[in-house]
Image (spheres, coloured by chain):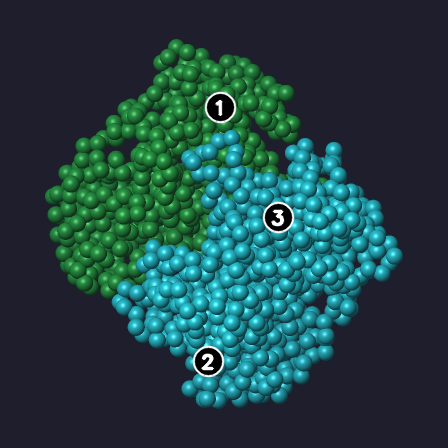
Chain colours: A cyan, B green
Amino acid sequence: MPPQSSQLILLIFNFDLSNSCLFSILQQNKGPGVACDFELHVNSWVGCRQSVEFQSSEFNMPSEKSEKAMSPKITGELLRQLRQAMKNCKYFSEPIQAYIIPSGDAHQSEYIAPCDCRREFISGFDGSAGTAIVTEQHAAMWTDGRYFLQASQQMDNNWTLMKMGLKETPSQEDWLISVLPENSKVGVDPWIIAADQWKNMFKALSSAGHSLVAVQDNLIDAVWPDRPERPSTQLRSLGLDYTGISWQDKITALRAKMSERKITWFVATALDEIAWLFNLRGADIEYNPVFFAYTIVGMNTIRFFVDLKRLSNPAVREHLQLDSPSKPELSIQTFPYESVYTELQAICAALGPKDKVWICDKASCALTQVIPKTHRTPIPYTPLCLAKAVKNATEIQGMKMAHIKDAVALCEFFAWLEKEIPKGNVTEISAADKAEELRSQQKDFVGLSFPTISSVGPHGAIIHYRPLPETNRTLTVNEVYLIDSGAQYVDGTTDVTRTMHFGTPSAFEKECFTYVLKGHIAVSAAIFPNGTKGHLLDSFARAALWESGLDYLHGTGHGVGCFLNVHEGPCGISYKTFADEPLEAGMIVSDEPGYYEDGSFGIRLENVVLVVPAKPKYNYRNRGSLTFEPLTLVPIQVKMMNTELLTQKERDWVNEYHRKCREVVGAELERQGRQEALDWLIRESQPII
Amino acid sequence: MPPQSSQLILLIFNFDLSNSCLFSILQQNKGPGVACDFELHVNSWVGCRQSVEFQSSEFNMPSEKSEKAMSPKITGELLRQLRQAMKNCKYFSEPIQAYIIPSGDAHQSEYIAPCDCRREFISGFDGSAGTAIVTEQHAAMWTDGRYFLQASQQMDNNWTLMKMGLKETPSQEDWLISVLPENSKVGVDPWIIAADQWKNMFKALSSAGHSLVAVQDNLIDAVWPDRPERPSTQLRSLGLDYTGISWQDKITALRAKMSERKITWFVATALDEIAWLFNLRGADIEYNPVFFAYTIVGMNTIRFFVDLKRLSNPAVREHLQLDSPSKPELSIQTFPYESVYTELQAICAALGPKDKVWICDKASCALTQVIPKTHRTPIPYTPLCLAKAVKNATEIQGMKMAHIKDAVALCEFFAWLEKEIPKGNVTEISAADKAEELRSQQKDFVGLSFPTISSVGPHGAIIHYRPLPETNRTLTVNEVYLIDSGAQYVDGTTDVTRTMHFGTPSAFEKECFTYVLKGHIAVSAAIFPNGTKGHLLDSFARAALWESGLDYLHGTGHGVGCFLNVHEGPCGISYKTFADEPLEAGMIVSDEPGYYEDGSFGIRLENVVLVVPAKPKYNYRNRGSLTFEPLTLVPIQVKMMNTELLTQKERDWVNEYHRKCREVVGAELERQGRQEALDWLIRESQPII
């Protein structure tokens, strides 16, 4: 799946990229060259601000109007209740004149649970990006070009749509300043807003004589009687055979980092970091095997904040040694999820003058501000984020296994497609369902790792397209088919894109495919020194396209978790110069250049690749070198290649890759007795000349 | 010349990279893998903070001890006087407990005039980077690995050397906090410190209960009786045949930008920007044809601050229309250089509530703070910096002419070397002198654009080496010779590096040279979309070296001025991800990958290249494409190439490049009747197969 940054937009202030409808992306701006730059905050997989180019499409989806439930939500009564709550001193000591409703949860997750879809609830607008602001007189929604039409159709006329990226559209700050009476108070839920964003909004409002105030109770929740419960799914503990390192050893390593930097406390707020730390998984958020929790680690104590009901499971109690800790410093104290605030307050009240507390600078304003400034050490990436990114031998083995199983399912899927498409009854949705069904037959399958992008012809040019009944197209032998899909297995997470033609591709389709392939190989085969950051490799993926005047408007790769989030930080491969961490052996990223011809077809070739040591001829200053090893082992369609455009080196790469697919996946197909898929694999992995 | 960032270091706080001895670089750290990261501020050519890798060399220059005048300066009495001045309420209302002496001038120039070498005066240490701090009891000097030995030899034992990059070395802030009594005042000259640096130091000291205070009179000047005068060289006005645009039109364009952004005043402080704006040149700073001045431009007024004596020249008066302005809004009001502060104060006192003032965020703290915060709009690059970077047709023509003349001189130089080296009496210095002499014979020659790097064998591995009598080596047929040199001509600025062998290069030398050449070609021939930032091209220059486990530890290119500074912003090609501006047609940068084998040889291949439109097969989203056209036209030594390592495309590039050298420079050599050089050129530009 392409890095979020590629397409998803954000915004001066609200930057949650997720909700349950993520990826149903409409591109609605018309006219050539309507491009806008936004400041984007991709929390979970990059975790830092980056400048993102968002290119509106000139192509109008024929079915865009029907893609969503488009009758506007009636919000008059809701807004009246919200405005009453804004004046209610039960929530804040004085009336507030404006209330900001960002999308997002308290953990700054990329995907969020239904109970956290507050902006959608108040406005009806369910796009993946948007910030609502309600004042005494106005209700306004900021969103970007992908959502102008959708938002205007989902919101009633109580709402003003603020079209981001257009010159005449004011920023949230400027708009607030223009509509607010003097000395106004602007409220926001400090749990939903990250510390660094609070700071920016606070400054802008203060300089205009207003104040930004933290309203502890969420005012949307106050007017949302049937708000869904926060999920509290069953926890699954993972043994050493899956994780390679016990949670006890992870705690010890964390404490070593803390003492190296003279840190006395560490506050973990990101859900995937907590899941990784304790070798636990949940299912609280779709596609992401995480669970709602916080953790505070001191040099001798571990405090774990989670719905305590979840800890009645004996296997989990045993796993966490709740009843018989091996050592006192590895004894986990459990607390209700909600008590993290008061516990952190208590910890901070007892801090010595030199005590320092680590917290990610993307953590919520609420928790961050509990820590007195002199004791607070904000960090762009936590030690857990960094440690999680470098997979150990067991995790690598698991990821390899997961990718072999995934390849088995996909080989079978493509063999099935080849047979079924000519019959004319395979659609984008039924194909996606078939791929899921075949994956689910594999051992330790848990679920998909993101909604399948199954797209035919022009839909392929919509980078994060997700088929819906209203848009569903039939696969034919006349159009290019792009499928970007992945799964969660207990031993690993997959994410693979293949672009296929089941008839005869045009010369232009082949040409573009071949440039994309050249870019994919250029990254995959690159040798680079230790210490190189991923963004330095991004241009390798584009050089062949650039030479012909082509390009793609998304990054080239993102970090991938191990039975965790399919997008994770702190590394990636992108033209955006964000503060990514250098690539290290053991990191796992995607390599997925593409080309999108609006209104016609889309091409993307994605493998998940492992960073491994390389051994070139020399070793300058003993720095050592790295390269990539593909974990994804699914043939790349030779029919789509114009092999004349490939160099001998590139042809060798393709042949070696296909040899490995045949060898590794072929053996597993044979073991599983999937003969048709094996035949397909052998046919599709013949050497090219 | 390589980008400064490559080697020059800076420092938390002091970041001037220049003094008259710049480039006499010693690499003195011992032991493998001693690498350090610093925060570097390259003012004039990049103008923003960047992270720079500084790699200490494992190779010890045999002659390093004799490279500098190494008897320490006796500073006891000077320090006593300085400490008295620190207590003297004539300078500041209360005694100050510490005084910071950065290197630098009030314009944040890369190179500085002798009168601005204050850190050298007080300490004796004349390296290009260093910050001195004097307290009542201590005197400490922060410098980096290149200067540890030199600083320790040039400073007496009143001084403590703070070896930056070593773990045990405290930062300036931490050291100050550790040695100062409570509630101390730390003074600094607000003209020498940039606004953004002031901010950082201010914060650090404030949080420890101290204060950073601006001492308007420079305390070094107060104890420097024979301080050189500030240079006030004759101004040279450039006509339209050199500049292409009159200063009047530049003012009009600037005002258009200002009104677009609703800016009422613009304060220009960078010397090259002021020289460019008025189409004037000076010679106040060696190698840089600039002059000390400030300018403040309003929508109807132009205030020019300069030593008024310089304006008695009738040609200059006429050029600036001082006596008969064509229009009132183009009438230049002249003021003494020193009165910029009071004039800016007067302007700011009269600002309307909505008036905004543009100033570069790298401008001095002194001038920046005159502008009230609510009226101040700091910008990373001024509109002059951006406009100056995109050369117009006249400037491009001038740059091309300058490069042809430069190539004539270099062809003659190399032909001469070939003849003279076997006689055994050409040295690094005499070679550099000969190159200068030959350049000086060319029309409109003004001087060198930087000190010539003329280096034999192991000296070539010292990236900014400058030969001195004590280090001077003889050129032989057994060692690689690297010359990086350039000149100022009235029509343009040059900067070219060639690496030659006058006997038989080793296979390893040829192999490395060929990788460097492949990198040079990869950048020079790259096609990339409009809007691409230079740093995205940096990896192209390294790919061939990386593949063999090699690399070079400097950036690949810097902007080049037109009869202005050889290093200028806002574009460049570097692995550091700084906030460079996108490349545009008309911009001029260097393309100079290298390889340095410590103790043995150095290779660098540098052309100055012009960004030009490219016309590839397609034009994705009508963005348009760019590529480079080499302006430097000096043959690249075929003898150093291992042509087997070149692809056919690369061989074609070399042949086409040499064809152009022969055609363009050959014609000029013929016109000038320089037959020997012509013969050399023809021989050196034969096609390779």
Q: Chain of mark 3?
A: A
Circles 2, 3 touching at the beta carbon (< 8 Å): no
Snapshot quadrant of residue B63: top left
Q: Helix, strand or loop at disc 3?
A: loop
Q: Is residue A23 above or below residue A676?
A: below
Graded by Cα atoms within 10 Å as few (under 14), some (14 to 19) or many (20 or more), the crowding at tag 1 reads few
Which residue does the image show at 57% across and 17% down from the upper left?
Answer: B682
Circles 1, 2 touching at the beta carbon (< 8 Å): no
N-term mark: 2 or 3 = 2
- Name the residue tied to disc 2: A215
Q: Is residue B533 above or below residue A352?
A: above
Q: Helix, strand or loop at disc 1?
A: helix
Left or right of residue A35, residue B471 in this image: left
CA separation in Å, label 1 and label 2: 68 Å
* Label 1 in the same subunit as label 2: no
Q: How many marks?
A: 3
The image position of residue B565, as x and y in percent, is 42, 39
